[in-house]
Amino acid sequence: MMSSLAVAPAPETEPPFMQKLNSGQRRAVEALEGPVLVLAGAGTGKTRVLTTRLAWLLYTGAAQPGQIMAVTFTNKAANEIRERVGHMLGCSTDGWYMGTFHALAARLLRPYAERVGLKSNFTILDDDDQIRLIKQLVQAHNLDDKRNPARLLHAVISSWKDKGLTPDKAPSDSGDLADGKLRQIYAEYQERLLSLNACDFGDLLLHHLTLCQKHPDVLSNLHARFKYMMVDEYQDTNVAQYMWLRLLAQGSNNLCVVGDEDQSIYGWRGAEVGNILRFADDFPGATVVRLEENYRSTGHILSAANGLIANNRQRLGKQLRAVAGMGDKVVVASYWDHDEEARRIAGKIEAAHRGGHSLAQMAIMVRAGSQTRAFEEVFLSLGIPYKVLVGARFYERLEIRDAMAYLRVLMVPEDDLAFERIINTPKRGIGPSAMQQLAQLARDQNIPLTESVLRLCETDELKPKMRQTLQQLMQSFSRWRQLLHTMPHPEVAQIVLDESGYTGMWQADKSPEAPGRLENLKELINAIGEFNTLPAFLEHVALVMERAADAGAEQVSMMTLHGAKGLEFDTVY
Protein backbone atom coordinates (compact mmCIF):
# COMPACT_ATOMS: atom_id res chain seq x y z
CA MET A 1 0.00 0.00 0.00
CA MET A 2 1.54 3.30 -1.09
CA SER A 3 1.34 6.32 1.14
CA SER A 4 -0.12 9.62 0.06
CA LEU A 5 2.41 12.21 -1.05
CA ALA A 6 3.80 14.33 1.77
CA VAL A 7 4.39 17.79 0.34
CA ALA A 8 6.36 20.57 2.00
CA PRO A 9 4.55 23.90 2.32
CA ALA A 10 5.08 25.82 -0.91
CA PRO A 11 6.79 29.20 -0.66
CA GLU A 12 4.77 32.23 -1.72
CA THR A 13 6.69 32.48 -5.00
CA GLU A 14 7.60 29.34 -6.91
CA PRO A 15 11.21 29.40 -8.17
CA PRO A 16 11.91 29.18 -11.93
CA PHE A 17 13.51 25.74 -11.60
CA MET A 18 10.14 24.27 -10.56
CA GLN A 19 8.24 25.64 -13.53
CA LYS A 20 9.79 23.33 -16.14
CA LEU A 21 8.70 20.10 -14.45
CA ASN A 22 6.01 17.84 -15.85
CA SER A 23 3.42 16.40 -13.46
CA GLY A 24 5.33 13.19 -12.71
CA GLN A 25 8.59 15.02 -12.10
CA ARG A 26 6.81 17.50 -9.83
CA ARG A 27 5.32 14.70 -7.72
CA ALA A 28 8.78 13.17 -7.30
CA VAL A 29 10.32 16.51 -6.32
CA GLU A 30 7.62 17.50 -3.84
CA ALA A 31 7.40 14.13 -2.04
CA LEU A 32 9.74 15.09 0.79
CA GLU A 33 8.76 12.93 3.75
CA GLY A 34 9.25 9.19 4.00
CA PRO A 35 10.80 6.72 1.55
CA VAL A 36 10.33 7.53 -2.15
CA LEU A 37 10.98 5.33 -5.18
CA VAL A 38 11.19 7.19 -8.48
CA LEU A 39 10.95 4.76 -11.40
CA ALA A 40 12.60 6.82 -14.12
CA GLY A 41 12.53 5.31 -17.59
CA ALA A 42 15.27 6.19 -20.06
CA GLY A 43 15.15 9.82 -21.16
CA THR A 44 12.47 10.84 -18.66
CA GLY A 45 14.54 13.47 -16.85
CA LYS A 46 15.84 11.67 -13.77
CA THR A 47 18.80 14.04 -13.40
CA ARG A 48 16.39 16.98 -13.48
CA VAL A 49 14.36 15.32 -10.72
CA LEU A 50 17.41 14.69 -8.53
CA THR A 51 18.82 18.19 -8.91
CA THR A 52 15.47 19.95 -8.58
CA ARG A 53 14.52 17.88 -5.54
CA LEU A 54 17.77 18.81 -3.83
CA ALA A 55 17.29 22.48 -4.70
CA TRP A 56 13.65 22.34 -3.51
CA LEU A 57 14.68 20.88 -0.14
CA LEU A 58 16.98 23.85 0.39
CA TYR A 59 14.65 26.46 -1.12
CA THR A 60 11.77 25.44 1.14
CA GLY A 61 13.99 25.29 4.22
CA ALA A 62 13.23 21.60 4.74
CA ALA A 63 16.96 21.00 5.17
CA GLN A 64 20.35 22.68 5.25
CA PRO A 65 23.11 21.64 2.80
CA GLY A 66 24.96 19.57 5.43
CA GLN A 67 21.79 17.57 6.17
CA ILE A 68 21.46 16.11 2.68
CA MET A 69 23.44 13.26 1.15
CA ALA A 70 23.26 12.67 -2.62
CA VAL A 71 24.89 9.44 -3.82
CA THR A 72 25.86 8.69 -7.43
CA PHE A 73 27.80 5.97 -9.24
CA THR A 74 30.21 8.19 -11.15
CA ASN A 75 32.14 11.38 -10.48
CA LYS A 76 30.69 12.74 -13.72
CA ALA A 77 27.13 12.36 -12.42
CA ALA A 78 28.07 13.89 -9.06
CA ASN A 79 29.70 16.89 -10.74
CA GLU A 80 26.68 17.38 -13.01
CA ILE A 81 24.30 17.42 -10.05
CA ARG A 82 26.61 19.76 -8.15
CA GLU A 83 26.81 22.21 -11.08
CA ARG A 84 23.08 22.18 -11.79
CA VAL A 85 22.10 22.74 -8.16
CA GLY A 86 24.64 25.53 -7.83
CA HIS A 87 23.20 27.18 -10.93
CA MET A 88 19.60 26.80 -9.71
CA LEU A 89 20.31 28.34 -6.32
CA GLY A 90 23.09 30.71 -7.36
CA CYS A 91 25.49 29.48 -4.70
CA SER A 92 28.59 27.34 -4.21
CA THR A 93 28.11 23.64 -3.48
CA ASP A 94 31.62 23.10 -2.10
CA GLY A 95 31.65 20.84 0.93
CA TRP A 96 28.18 19.41 0.33
CA TYR A 97 27.72 15.66 0.70
CA MET A 98 27.41 14.82 -3.00
CA GLY A 99 29.54 12.10 -4.55
CA THR A 100 30.06 8.45 -5.34
CA PHE A 101 29.59 5.67 -2.80
CA HIS A 102 33.37 5.37 -2.47
CA ALA A 103 34.00 9.10 -2.09
CA LEU A 104 31.32 9.59 0.55
CA ALA A 105 32.26 6.44 2.47
CA ALA A 106 35.91 7.58 2.57
CA ARG A 107 34.88 11.02 3.81
CA LEU A 108 32.70 9.58 6.56
CA LEU A 109 35.25 6.93 7.53
CA ARG A 110 38.30 9.17 8.09
CA PRO A 111 37.14 10.79 11.38
CA TYR A 112 36.62 7.31 12.87
CA ALA A 113 39.41 5.46 11.04
CA GLU A 114 41.16 4.39 14.27
CA ARG A 115 38.12 2.32 15.25
CA VAL A 116 38.74 0.00 12.29
CA GLY A 117 42.52 -0.12 12.75
CA LEU A 118 43.49 2.70 10.40
CA LYS A 119 44.77 6.24 10.78
CA SER A 120 42.78 9.16 9.43
CA ASN A 121 45.36 9.76 6.69
CA PHE A 122 44.97 6.26 5.22
CA THR A 123 45.75 5.81 1.53
CA ILE A 124 43.58 4.16 -1.12
CA LEU A 125 45.50 1.64 -3.22
CA ASP A 126 44.92 1.31 -6.96
CA ASP A 127 44.24 -2.04 -8.64
CA ASP A 128 47.88 -2.69 -9.52
CA ASP A 129 49.03 -2.30 -5.92
CA GLN A 130 46.18 -4.48 -4.65
CA ILE A 131 47.06 -7.27 -7.09
CA ARG A 132 50.74 -6.98 -6.19
CA LEU A 133 49.89 -7.51 -2.51
CA ILE A 134 47.84 -10.61 -3.29
CA LYS A 135 50.63 -11.92 -5.53
CA GLN A 136 53.01 -11.65 -2.57
CA LEU A 137 50.60 -13.68 -0.43
CA VAL A 138 50.26 -16.32 -3.15
CA GLN A 139 54.04 -16.68 -3.18
CA ALA A 140 54.19 -16.76 0.62
CA HIS A 141 51.82 -19.75 0.58
CA ASN A 142 53.94 -21.48 -2.10
CA LEU A 143 50.96 -21.58 -4.45
CA ASP A 144 51.29 -21.97 -8.21
CA ASP A 145 50.70 -18.42 -9.49
CA LYS A 146 49.66 -19.75 -12.91
CA ARG A 147 46.87 -21.85 -11.42
CA ASN A 148 46.07 -19.09 -8.94
CA PRO A 149 46.53 -15.79 -10.78
CA ALA A 150 46.47 -12.85 -8.37
CA ARG A 151 44.05 -10.98 -10.62
CA LEU A 152 41.50 -13.79 -10.30
CA LEU A 153 41.87 -14.04 -6.51
CA HIS A 154 41.56 -10.26 -6.28
CA ALA A 155 38.31 -10.38 -8.28
CA VAL A 156 36.81 -12.99 -5.93
CA ILE A 157 37.86 -11.07 -2.80
CA SER A 158 36.39 -7.88 -4.29
CA SER A 159 33.12 -9.71 -4.99
CA TRP A 160 33.00 -10.80 -1.34
CA LYS A 161 33.48 -7.21 -0.24
CA ASP A 162 30.70 -6.10 -2.60
CA LYS A 163 28.45 -8.54 -0.75
CA GLY A 164 29.44 -7.07 2.62
CA LEU A 165 31.46 -10.14 3.62
CA THR A 166 34.42 -9.64 5.95
CA PRO A 167 37.02 -12.47 6.14
CA ASP A 168 35.21 -14.16 9.04
CA LYS A 169 31.97 -14.24 7.01
CA ALA A 170 33.45 -15.20 3.64
CA PRO A 171 32.66 -18.70 2.32
CA SER A 172 34.97 -21.24 3.94
CA ASP A 173 34.86 -23.41 0.83
CA SER A 174 36.45 -21.60 -2.12
CA GLY A 175 36.84 -24.78 -4.17
CA ASP A 176 40.15 -25.15 -5.96
CA LEU A 177 40.97 -21.45 -5.65
CA ALA A 178 44.27 -21.00 -3.81
CA ASP A 179 44.10 -24.69 -2.85
CA GLY A 180 41.16 -23.86 -0.59
CA LYS A 181 43.09 -21.14 1.23
CA LEU A 182 41.43 -18.09 -0.31
CA ARG A 183 39.56 -17.16 2.87
CA GLN A 184 42.88 -17.23 4.75
CA ILE A 185 44.55 -15.15 2.03
CA TYR A 186 41.66 -12.67 2.26
CA ALA A 187 42.25 -12.33 6.02
CA GLU A 188 46.01 -11.89 5.54
CA TYR A 189 45.39 -9.39 2.74
CA GLN A 190 43.25 -7.31 5.12
CA GLU A 191 45.96 -7.48 7.80
CA ARG A 192 48.55 -6.37 5.27
CA LEU A 193 46.38 -3.44 4.22
CA LEU A 194 45.99 -2.32 7.83
CA SER A 195 49.75 -2.54 8.39
CA LEU A 196 50.20 -0.25 5.38
CA ASN A 197 47.48 2.12 6.65
CA ALA A 198 45.71 1.51 3.36
CA CYS A 199 42.35 0.51 1.90
CA ASP A 200 41.19 -0.81 -1.41
CA PHE A 201 37.97 0.55 -2.92
CA GLY A 202 35.84 -2.25 -1.49
CA ASP A 203 37.16 -1.50 2.00
CA LEU A 204 35.87 2.06 1.99
CA LEU A 205 32.26 0.91 2.14
CA LEU A 206 32.94 -2.31 4.05
CA HIS A 207 34.91 -0.55 6.81
CA HIS A 208 32.26 2.13 7.20
CA LEU A 209 29.51 -0.48 7.19
CA THR A 210 31.34 -2.42 9.92
CA LEU A 211 31.91 0.82 11.83
CA CYS A 212 28.19 1.63 11.84
CA GLN A 213 27.23 -1.91 12.82
CA LYS A 214 29.66 -2.18 15.75
CA HIS A 215 29.60 1.39 17.07
CA PRO A 216 26.06 2.68 17.77
CA ASP A 217 27.35 6.14 18.65
CA VAL A 218 28.78 6.57 15.14
CA LEU A 219 25.50 5.52 13.56
CA SER A 220 23.54 7.83 15.88
CA ASN A 221 25.72 10.77 14.86
CA LEU A 222 25.07 10.03 11.20
CA HIS A 223 21.33 9.71 11.79
CA ALA A 224 21.36 13.10 13.51
CA ARG A 225 23.38 14.65 10.70
CA PHE A 226 21.54 13.46 7.59
CA LYS A 227 17.89 14.37 7.33
CA TYR A 228 17.51 13.43 3.66
CA MET A 229 19.26 10.92 1.41
CA MET A 230 19.03 10.57 -2.37
CA VAL A 231 20.50 7.82 -4.53
CA ASP A 232 20.94 7.74 -8.31
CA GLU A 233 20.87 4.54 -10.44
CA TYR A 234 19.50 2.48 -7.55
CA GLN A 235 19.09 -0.58 -9.81
CA ASP A 236 22.90 -0.81 -9.99
CA THR A 237 23.52 -1.03 -6.22
CA ASN A 238 25.22 -4.13 -4.84
CA VAL A 239 24.60 -5.85 -1.50
CA ALA A 240 27.12 -3.81 0.52
CA GLN A 241 25.80 -0.51 -0.87
CA TYR A 242 22.23 -1.60 -0.10
CA MET A 243 23.14 -2.53 3.50
CA TRP A 244 24.97 0.78 3.96
CA LEU A 245 22.04 2.84 2.66
CA ARG A 246 19.53 0.98 4.83
CA LEU A 247 21.60 1.62 7.94
CA LEU A 248 22.02 5.34 7.24
CA ALA A 249 18.36 5.80 6.28
CA GLN A 250 17.04 4.29 9.52
CA GLY A 251 17.31 7.64 11.26
CA SER A 252 14.99 9.88 9.25
CA ASN A 253 13.50 7.27 6.88
CA ASN A 254 13.71 10.01 4.22
CA LEU A 255 15.40 7.98 1.50
CA CYS A 256 14.64 8.84 -2.12
CA VAL A 257 16.03 6.46 -4.74
CA VAL A 258 15.87 6.97 -8.49
CA GLY A 259 16.29 4.05 -10.85
CA ASP A 260 14.85 1.79 -13.50
CA GLU A 261 14.77 -1.98 -13.20
CA ASP A 262 14.61 -2.17 -17.00
CA GLN A 263 18.09 -0.61 -17.15
CA SER A 264 19.76 -3.11 -14.83
CA ILE A 265 22.71 -4.20 -16.98
CA TYR A 266 25.50 -4.61 -14.43
CA GLY A 267 24.59 -7.89 -12.75
CA TRP A 268 27.92 -9.30 -13.94
CA ARG A 269 29.74 -6.90 -11.62
CA GLY A 270 27.63 -7.45 -8.54
CA ALA A 271 24.57 -5.23 -9.07
CA GLU A 272 21.41 -6.65 -7.45
CA VAL A 273 18.25 -5.69 -9.35
CA GLY A 274 16.30 -7.13 -6.40
CA ASN A 275 17.24 -4.02 -4.40
CA ILE A 276 14.92 -1.86 -6.49
CA LEU A 277 12.29 -4.56 -7.02
CA ARG A 278 11.69 -4.98 -3.28
CA PHE A 279 12.08 -1.32 -2.27
CA ALA A 280 8.41 -1.00 -1.32
CA ASP A 281 8.72 -4.10 0.89
CA ASP A 282 11.94 -2.93 2.52
CA PHE A 283 10.48 0.52 3.19
CA PRO A 284 6.78 0.12 4.06
CA GLY A 285 4.58 3.04 3.07
CA ALA A 286 6.97 4.09 0.31
CA THR A 287 5.74 6.58 -2.26
CA VAL A 288 6.25 5.27 -5.79
CA VAL A 289 6.39 7.76 -8.66
CA ARG A 290 6.67 6.64 -12.29
CA LEU A 291 8.30 8.93 -14.86
CA GLU A 292 6.96 7.81 -18.23
CA GLU A 293 7.27 10.87 -20.49
CA ASN A 294 10.33 10.29 -22.66
CA TYR A 295 12.15 13.32 -24.08
CA ARG A 296 14.92 11.39 -25.84
CA SER A 297 13.28 9.08 -28.38
CA THR A 298 10.37 8.96 -30.80
CA GLY A 299 7.17 6.96 -30.55
CA HIS A 300 8.17 4.21 -32.96
CA ILE A 301 11.47 3.63 -31.16
CA LEU A 302 9.72 3.50 -27.79
CA SER A 303 7.08 1.09 -29.10
CA ALA A 304 9.83 -1.28 -30.21
CA ALA A 305 11.65 -0.91 -26.89
CA ASN A 306 8.46 -1.37 -24.86
CA GLY A 307 7.65 -4.50 -26.85
CA LEU A 308 11.05 -6.01 -26.11
CA ILE A 309 11.28 -5.13 -22.43
CA ALA A 310 7.75 -6.43 -21.80
CA ASN A 311 9.27 -9.93 -22.01
CA ASN A 312 11.29 -9.31 -18.83
CA ARG A 313 9.81 -11.23 -15.92
CA GLN A 314 11.06 -9.09 -13.03
CA ARG A 315 9.47 -5.69 -13.60
CA LEU A 316 7.65 -3.06 -11.58
CA GLY A 317 5.99 -1.88 -14.77
CA LYS A 318 5.80 1.37 -16.70
CA GLN A 319 4.98 2.43 -20.26
CA LEU A 320 7.14 5.12 -21.80
CA ARG A 321 5.45 7.74 -23.99
CA ALA A 322 7.28 9.94 -26.50
CA VAL A 323 6.94 13.69 -26.16
CA ALA A 324 8.51 14.20 -29.61
CA GLY A 325 5.85 12.35 -31.62
CA MET A 326 6.07 9.10 -33.58
CA GLY A 327 9.04 9.97 -35.85
CA ASP A 328 10.53 7.58 -38.40
CA LYS A 329 9.82 3.87 -38.19
CA VAL A 330 12.46 1.51 -36.88
CA VAL A 331 14.15 -0.25 -39.82
CA VAL A 332 15.08 -3.92 -39.42
CA ALA A 333 17.65 -5.09 -41.99
CA SER A 334 19.28 -8.50 -42.47
CA TYR A 335 22.73 -8.96 -44.02
CA TRP A 336 24.74 -11.96 -45.17
CA ASP A 337 27.62 -11.35 -42.76
CA HIS A 338 29.38 -8.70 -40.64
CA ASP A 339 31.36 -7.39 -43.60
CA GLU A 340 28.30 -6.79 -45.79
CA GLU A 341 26.54 -5.18 -42.85
CA ALA A 342 29.50 -2.84 -42.32
CA ARG A 343 29.67 -1.89 -46.02
CA ARG A 344 25.93 -1.17 -46.26
CA ILE A 345 25.82 0.91 -43.09
CA ALA A 346 28.95 2.81 -44.10
CA GLY A 347 27.23 3.62 -47.41
CA LYS A 348 24.18 4.95 -45.59
CA ILE A 349 26.34 7.07 -43.31
CA GLU A 350 28.24 8.51 -46.29
CA ALA A 351 24.97 9.38 -48.02
CA ALA A 352 23.54 10.99 -44.89
CA HIS A 353 26.73 13.00 -44.39
CA ARG A 354 26.58 14.27 -47.97
CA GLY A 355 23.00 15.27 -47.23
CA GLY A 356 24.16 17.54 -44.43
CA HIS A 357 23.86 15.26 -41.40
CA SER A 358 26.60 15.49 -38.78
CA LEU A 359 28.81 12.44 -38.25
CA ALA A 360 28.93 13.34 -34.57
CA GLN A 361 25.20 12.62 -34.35
CA MET A 362 25.52 9.08 -35.74
CA ALA A 363 26.31 5.97 -33.72
CA ILE A 364 26.85 2.26 -34.23
CA MET A 365 26.03 0.00 -31.30
CA VAL A 366 27.25 -3.59 -31.05
CA ARG A 367 26.67 -6.41 -28.60
CA ALA A 368 30.36 -7.16 -28.04
CA GLY A 369 33.50 -5.09 -28.56
CA SER A 370 34.88 -7.58 -31.10
CA GLN A 371 32.08 -6.65 -33.51
CA THR A 372 33.48 -3.18 -34.18
CA ARG A 373 36.32 -4.69 -36.26
CA ALA A 374 34.38 -4.99 -39.53
CA PHE A 375 33.06 -1.43 -39.20
CA GLU A 376 36.50 -0.04 -38.38
CA GLU A 377 38.02 -1.69 -41.47
CA VAL A 378 35.37 -0.29 -43.81
CA PHE A 379 35.36 3.16 -42.23
CA LEU A 380 39.13 3.43 -42.53
CA SER A 381 39.10 2.29 -46.16
CA LEU A 382 36.41 4.87 -47.00
CA GLY A 383 37.98 7.62 -44.89
CA ILE A 384 35.00 7.96 -42.53
CA PRO A 385 36.26 9.34 -39.18
CA TYR A 386 35.16 7.35 -36.15
CA LYS A 387 35.88 6.83 -32.47
CA VAL A 388 35.34 3.85 -30.21
CA LEU A 389 33.73 4.79 -26.90
CA VAL A 390 34.47 2.88 -23.69
CA GLY A 391 37.36 0.91 -25.11
CA ALA A 392 40.22 1.03 -27.56
CA ARG A 393 40.01 0.66 -31.32
CA PHE A 394 40.15 -2.98 -32.37
CA TYR A 395 43.80 -3.06 -33.44
CA GLU A 396 44.84 -1.03 -30.39
CA ARG A 397 43.49 -3.54 -27.87
CA LEU A 398 46.07 -5.27 -25.68
CA GLU A 399 45.30 -8.82 -26.79
CA ILE A 400 45.27 -7.83 -30.47
CA ARG A 401 48.62 -6.04 -30.15
CA ASP A 402 50.07 -9.13 -28.45
CA ALA A 403 48.72 -11.48 -31.12
CA MET A 404 49.94 -9.17 -33.89
CA ALA A 405 53.40 -9.16 -32.29
CA TYR A 406 53.53 -12.97 -32.51
CA LEU A 407 52.58 -12.80 -36.19
CA ARG A 408 55.14 -10.08 -36.89
CA VAL A 409 57.93 -12.20 -35.37
CA LEU A 410 56.66 -15.16 -37.37
CA MET A 411 57.06 -13.25 -40.64
CA VAL A 412 59.98 -10.97 -39.70
CA PRO A 413 62.27 -12.53 -37.05
CA GLU A 414 64.27 -9.28 -36.99
CA ASP A 415 61.33 -7.34 -35.52
CA ASP A 416 62.87 -6.67 -32.10
CA LEU A 417 59.97 -4.56 -30.81
CA ALA A 418 57.49 -7.35 -31.47
CA PHE A 419 59.81 -9.97 -29.98
CA GLU A 420 60.31 -7.92 -26.81
CA ARG A 421 56.54 -7.77 -26.43
CA ILE A 422 55.93 -11.52 -26.64
CA ILE A 423 59.06 -13.16 -25.22
CA ASN A 424 57.51 -13.23 -21.74
CA THR A 425 53.83 -13.15 -22.72
CA PRO A 426 52.50 -15.44 -21.38
CA LYS A 427 54.92 -15.64 -18.46
CA ARG A 428 57.97 -17.78 -19.27
CA GLY A 429 60.25 -16.71 -16.44
CA ILE A 430 62.24 -14.30 -18.61
CA GLY A 431 63.04 -11.53 -16.16
CA PRO A 432 64.55 -8.06 -16.66
CA SER A 433 68.13 -9.26 -16.12
CA ALA A 434 67.80 -11.94 -18.81
CA MET A 435 66.27 -9.43 -21.20
CA GLN A 436 69.11 -7.02 -20.50
CA GLN A 437 71.62 -9.79 -21.23
CA LEU A 438 69.91 -10.61 -24.55
CA ALA A 439 69.68 -6.95 -25.54
CA GLN A 440 73.35 -6.30 -24.69
CA LEU A 441 74.52 -9.20 -26.88
CA ALA A 442 72.28 -8.00 -29.71
CA ARG A 443 73.79 -4.51 -29.50
CA ASP A 444 77.37 -5.73 -29.19
CA GLN A 445 77.13 -8.02 -32.20
CA ASN A 446 74.62 -5.94 -34.17
CA ILE A 447 72.18 -8.82 -34.49
CA PRO A 448 68.40 -9.16 -33.91
CA LEU A 449 67.13 -10.30 -30.52
CA THR A 450 65.99 -13.63 -31.96
CA GLU A 451 69.55 -14.34 -33.14
CA SER A 452 70.84 -13.21 -29.75
CA VAL A 453 68.60 -15.82 -28.12
CA LEU A 454 69.93 -18.58 -30.38
CA ARG A 455 73.55 -17.67 -29.65
CA LEU A 456 73.09 -17.39 -25.89
CA CYS A 457 71.33 -20.77 -25.83
CA GLU A 458 74.54 -22.30 -27.21
CA THR A 459 76.43 -21.13 -24.11
CA ASP A 460 76.18 -21.79 -20.38
CA GLU A 461 75.41 -18.16 -19.55
CA LEU A 462 71.70 -18.81 -19.06
CA LYS A 463 70.14 -20.95 -16.36
CA PRO A 464 69.26 -24.43 -17.71
CA LYS A 465 65.50 -23.97 -17.29
CA MET A 466 65.52 -20.58 -19.02
CA ARG A 467 67.74 -21.91 -21.81
CA GLN A 468 65.32 -24.79 -22.38
CA THR A 469 62.32 -22.42 -22.41
CA LEU A 470 63.93 -20.11 -24.98
CA GLN A 471 65.06 -23.01 -27.16
CA GLN A 472 61.51 -24.37 -27.21
CA LEU A 473 60.15 -20.94 -28.15
CA MET A 474 62.60 -20.52 -31.04
CA GLN A 475 61.94 -24.07 -32.24
CA SER A 476 58.22 -23.33 -32.19
CA PHE A 477 58.67 -20.26 -34.39
CA SER A 478 60.72 -22.33 -36.87
CA ARG A 479 58.02 -25.00 -37.00
CA TRP A 480 55.22 -22.44 -37.39
CA ARG A 481 57.07 -20.85 -40.33
CA GLN A 482 57.27 -24.26 -42.02
CA LEU A 483 53.52 -24.74 -41.53
CA LEU A 484 52.88 -21.63 -43.65
CA HIS A 485 54.03 -23.66 -46.69
CA THR A 486 51.48 -26.42 -46.13
CA MET A 487 48.52 -24.93 -44.23
CA PRO A 488 46.17 -21.95 -44.72
CA HIS A 489 47.62 -18.91 -42.96
CA PRO A 490 44.55 -18.30 -40.70
CA GLU A 491 44.96 -21.84 -39.33
CA VAL A 492 48.66 -21.24 -38.73
CA ALA A 493 47.84 -18.00 -36.90
CA GLN A 494 45.44 -19.91 -34.65
CA ILE A 495 48.09 -22.57 -33.99
CA VAL A 496 50.60 -19.86 -33.03
CA LEU A 497 48.21 -18.36 -30.48
CA ASP A 498 47.25 -21.77 -29.08
CA GLU A 499 50.67 -23.45 -28.92
CA SER A 500 52.40 -20.34 -27.57
CA GLY A 501 50.07 -20.49 -24.59
CA TYR A 502 48.57 -17.09 -25.36
CA THR A 503 45.01 -18.35 -25.87
CA GLY A 504 45.30 -20.50 -22.76
CA MET A 505 46.47 -17.51 -20.75
CA TRP A 506 43.17 -15.73 -21.38
CA GLN A 507 41.13 -18.93 -20.95
CA ALA A 508 42.62 -19.30 -17.46
CA ASP A 509 42.00 -15.63 -16.66
CA LYS A 510 38.72 -15.30 -14.74
CA SER A 511 38.48 -11.52 -14.91
CA PRO A 512 35.33 -9.98 -16.47
CA GLU A 513 37.41 -8.77 -19.45
CA ALA A 514 38.77 -12.21 -20.42
CA PRO A 515 35.77 -13.50 -22.45
CA GLY A 516 35.77 -10.30 -24.51
CA ARG A 517 39.49 -10.65 -25.18
CA LEU A 518 38.98 -14.23 -26.42
CA GLU A 519 36.18 -13.02 -28.70
CA ASN A 520 38.52 -10.37 -30.09
CA LEU A 521 41.16 -13.02 -30.84
CA LYS A 522 38.57 -15.05 -32.75
CA GLU A 523 37.62 -11.96 -34.72
CA LEU A 524 41.30 -11.37 -35.52
CA ILE A 525 41.56 -14.85 -37.07
CA ASN A 526 38.44 -14.06 -39.14
CA ALA A 527 40.06 -10.84 -40.35
CA ILE A 528 43.26 -12.68 -41.33
CA GLY A 529 41.18 -15.02 -43.49
CA GLU A 530 40.06 -12.10 -45.65
CA PHE A 531 43.61 -11.69 -47.03
CA ASN A 532 45.55 -13.96 -49.38
CA THR A 533 48.69 -13.97 -47.26
CA LEU A 534 49.78 -13.13 -43.75
CA PRO A 535 52.18 -10.38 -44.94
CA ALA A 536 49.31 -8.76 -46.85
CA PHE A 537 47.25 -8.70 -43.67
CA LEU A 538 50.09 -7.26 -41.58
CA GLU A 539 50.66 -4.51 -44.14
CA HIS A 540 46.94 -3.75 -44.19
CA VAL A 541 46.87 -3.34 -40.41
CA ALA A 542 49.91 -1.07 -40.46
CA LEU A 543 48.22 1.18 -43.02
CA VAL A 544 44.94 1.07 -41.12
CA MET A 545 46.66 2.25 -37.94
CA GLU A 546 48.37 5.07 -39.84
CA ARG A 547 45.06 6.31 -41.24
CA ALA A 548 43.42 5.99 -37.81
CA ALA A 549 45.80 8.61 -36.46
CA ASP A 550 44.45 11.16 -38.96
CA ALA A 551 40.83 11.04 -37.73
CA GLY A 552 39.12 14.44 -37.59
CA ALA A 553 37.07 16.06 -34.85
CA GLU A 554 33.64 15.10 -36.21
CA GLN A 555 33.40 11.33 -35.91
CA VAL A 556 30.89 8.50 -35.94
CA SER A 557 30.71 6.88 -32.49
CA MET A 558 31.04 3.11 -32.07
CA MET A 559 30.23 1.48 -28.75
CA THR A 560 28.82 -1.56 -27.02
CA LEU A 561 25.24 -1.44 -25.74
CA HIS A 562 26.62 -1.20 -22.19
CA GLY A 563 28.73 1.78 -23.18
CA ALA A 564 25.78 3.54 -24.82
CA LYS A 565 23.81 3.95 -21.60
CA GLY A 566 22.72 7.56 -21.15
CA LEU A 567 24.00 8.83 -24.52
CA GLU A 568 21.92 10.43 -27.28
CA PHE A 569 22.31 10.46 -31.09
CA ASP A 570 20.10 11.48 -34.00
CA THR A 571 20.77 8.27 -35.97
CA VAL A 572 21.67 4.88 -34.52
CA TYR A 573 22.60 1.64 -36.28
Image (cartoon, rainbow, N blue to C red):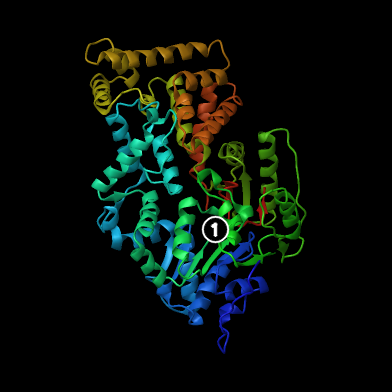
Give the quarter of the image for residue 171: top left
Quadrant the N terminus occupies: bottom right
Q: Amino acid at mark 1?
A: Tyr
Q: Residue furthest toward the bottom?
A: 12
Q: Residue at horizontal 56%, vertical 32%?
A: 519
Image position, residue 197 (x, y; %): 25, 50
Circle 1 SS class? helix
Residue 197 horizontal side relative to residue 505, left or right: left
Image position, residue 17 (x, y; %): 56, 78
Q: Is residue 288 visible?
A: yes
Q: Is residue 467 above or below residue 147?
A: above
**475 or 294, which lies in front?**
294
Q: Is residue 454 above or below residue 353?
A: above
Q: Residue at horizontal 44%, vertical 63%?
A: 248
Numbered-mark total: 1
Q: Is residue 359 visible?
A: no
User: Which residue has dot 1 on it?
Assistant: 234
**351 or 210, which lies in front?**
210
Q: Is residue 87 above or below residue 525?
A: below
Q: Residue at horizontal 73%, vertical 33%?
A: 336
Image position, residue 359 (x, y; %): 61, 53
**418 or 448, which lies in front?**
418
How dense is the environment of label 1, judged by Cα within 10 Å: few (below 14), some, or many (20 and up)? many
Image position, residue 376 (x, y; %): 58, 40
Q: Is residue 394 above or below residue 51?
A: above
Give the quarter of the image for residue 68: bottom left
**124 or 289, which lies in front?**
289
Residue 2 horizontal side relative to residue 492, left or right: right
